[in-house]
Amino acid sequence: MSSTFYLEILTPERKFFWGDVESIIVKTPTGEMGILKGHIPTVAVIDIGSIKIKKDGKWFEAVLSEGFMEVKQNHVIILVDTAEWPDEIDENRARAAKARAEERLQRRRSEAEYIQSKAALARAMARLKVKGKYN
């Protein structure tokens, strides 16, 4: 009996990942959430951070931005704004984005700018964390 389920990760620009996997771990606003075959149907918010994917006994990691996940019977669909493998991350660009976000957080001109700056900082930090693991 197979212990896999079908995973699709979609962004507005591309079909980032598709295929049978053994397990995933995603970041949600309340913490990490693990999914195995036979997980109960659910819908969850995806937070900025990494996704860990176990396929053929090996773990792979990528960075996801905000989005949603739907778990159905042995099929998981993740819809996010962006998704990147470690080799797609430009470390210098991520460092520059981190510095810009930190500078904007210091200014705090409006609530909207504060929220946008926190999200930009979270994206940059997630990219740097995952990129650092695979250098």
Image (cartoon, rainbow, N blue to C red):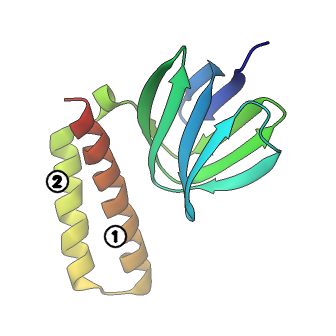
Which sits in the foreground, 17 or 58?
A: 58
Residue 111 vs residue 127, the one in the foreground: 127
At a point 31% along the width and 40% down the height, the residue shown is: 130
Q: At 38% from the left edge and 86% from the top edge, which residue is drawn?
A: 110
Q: In x, y percent, where is residue 75?
A: 76, 30
Q: Quadrant of residue 89?
A: top left
Count of marks placed on residues:
2
The type of residue carrying mark 1 is Ser
Q: Is residue 110 left or right of residue 95?
A: right
On the question of residue 108 being in view, the answer is: yes
- Considering only order in the chain, which callout, 2 or 1, is on the residue closer to the N terminus? 2
Kindly state the secondary structure of the residue where label 2 is placed: helix
Q: Amino acid at mark 2?
A: Ala
Is 20 situated above or below 111?
above
Q: What residue sits 65% from the left and 29% below the top?
A: 8
Relative image position of residue 5 (x, y in whole percent): 72, 24
Image x and y of residue 132, in percent:
21, 39
- Disc 1 is placed on an element classified as helix
**Residue for badge 1:** 117
Residue assigned mark 2: 96
Residue 84 in the image: above or below residue 112: above
The residue under the point 24% across, 74% down is 104
Foreground pick, 6 / 32: 32
| Residue 47, x across and y down, in percent | 52, 56
Left or right, residue 131 beside residue 30: left
- Whole-angstrom CA distance, mark 1 to mark 2, is 13 Å
Q: Quadrant of the N terminus?
A: top right
The answer to whether one can see residue 90 in this image is: no
